[in-house]
Image: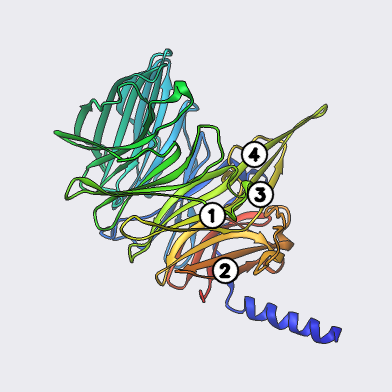
Amino acid sequence: MRKIYVLLSFIFCVFTLSSQTVRTLNPSISKSLTFYNFKLYPLDKNPSIDDENQYVFRNNFDEFLLYTIDKNGKVKTSPTVKVPKNHYWQGCYQTTDKIVSIYGSNDDETVNCYINVCDKNRMTWNPELLASFICHKKDNCYSKVSVSPNQTHFCFVALTADKKSNFQGMNVMVFDAEGQKVWENMVSPDFSNKTFNISDVAITDEGVVYISTPAYSGEKKKIYDEKIYLLEIKENDFKQVESNQNIGYISSAEIKLLKNGNVFIGGYYSEKKDDLLKGTFSLMYNTKEQYISTFTQREFPNYFSKNDVSSLNLDQIFELSNGQIYVLGEQLMTIVYRSQSGSSYKSFAKNIVYTSIDNNGNIENHEIIKKNQNFNSFIYIADFRQICLSYYAFEKDGALCLLFNDHNSNINSTKKTTPLINPVRSKKKNIVRLVKIDGSNLSNQIIMDGKLFKKSMHTFLFNEDNGLIVANLGKTVSIDKISITIK
């Protein structure tokens, strides 16, 4: 009987891994001891760009470099470019023959925005000042850069308020892909007697800027009556609309520019500022008719425990090609342990919570995908995603696919307890798992077995018809191509 069991287990393993082919592209890109010092950003391209290569921007806080992957899978590494330590990276994209990166810096009481344009074959640091504004120490200041979906425009938004959150000024600037200013507009939204903040900024391919702003007026009484305000800003025009109902305290909100031209805002809310999250809200703005067509909210289901929503962070809003919308959240946290010998840190990337929303903006349901990743360190790391892939979302055959590292005993498990996995240290027990969400149907698949390949996934880079290109953690960080068949 034991022999039969072992044979069946072997057959299952072969069946599960039969579609996996992992090919390491040349060269490896970093020693494993320094992997947490950088993040990789794959550069998507406008379909009009005629370039067979794929590009990955590597940000090392005070330096950057570029990986070029040609059509044959050969990886070329650029020389490292040093960046002044007072500069912080805000975004990057590619044009036909350039790599464009945007940086900010704070000098005394001035906030600056710079653009650095490089030839794809020669990385250089030659920044050009785009904008600056005064931020006195007595004030609260906010600045944000956003790039349009087709990467033909980007915007720089700067806002100043005093310590009591009284609005003082908002400046919106729009630039083309090369950094030439297209227009600038000083706007004055009305937030009289309200506590407000900017939650997200987005810019369309046509250069229209949208800003989501939660605001409430009941803080002194510890009663929150928060609404979402949406600002639509053009060169010579400005419009402010607000949701038609209060929903307590809005803890997070993000903008998604939909394929049909409408603007969607989704996020989480609670009853009071420091309470556990209570549910999800959604707002749909019709850009043609200039009004909010849908505003809905739904509490998390009763079977969600407190542990399921504690430390839940809104991560992204994903739209499928059929118009279905998903609000994706993840439980991210870092716990500090102190002792006489010093401090140690545990970073966690736990369950994924997703909210399904129809193409009209109505909330349908909430679901949880269980996982439990962690990493121990004597160095403080604020975000688990500096260390390893927490998860990645992409569309395949009209379904939403979620890709993440997981414990090998968690595949198709019905147990309430989710086993803990350190994907960096425990590769033999680590798998790269794919969950396919197709309507109400969920399916699981092992994409890569750490015991077989001695690797775990560091960063998802590109999704191709015949597989995936990812950065993997083994003895070194490598760029690998995984050929798979998604069931």
In-image side of 439 versus 452 (left or right): left
- Name the residue nearer the viewer: 172 or 1: 1
Quadrant for the N terminus, please: bottom right
Q: Are marks 3 and 2 in contact (CB under 8 Å)?
A: no
The image's mark for residue 23 is 2
Residue at image mark 4: 334
Q: CA distance from mark 4 to mark 3?
A: 21 Å
Residue 129 visible in rendering? no
Residue at image mark 3: 32
Q: Are marks 1 and 3 in contact (CB under 8 Å)?
A: no
Picture residue at 45% right of the left edge, 48% below the top: 280
Residue 86 visible in rendering? yes
> Which of label 2 and label 1 is nearer to you?
1
Q: Residues within 10 Å of mark 1 (few under 14, many from 20)?
A: few
The image's mark for residue 301 is 1
Q: CA distance from mark 1 to mark 3?
A: 42 Å
Task: Indicate the quadrant where residue 261 lies.
Answer: bottom left
User: What amino acid type should be assigned to the residue bearing mark 2?
Assistant: Arg
Q: Residues within 10 Å of mark 4 (few under 14, many from 20)?
A: some
> Which of label 4 and label 1 is nearer to you?
1
**How many badges with numbers are in the image?**
4
Q: Position of residue 164 (x, y in %)?
A: 40, 17
Establish if 391 lies above or below 193: below
N-terminal of the two: label 2 or label 1? 2
N-terminal of the two: label 1 or label 3? 3
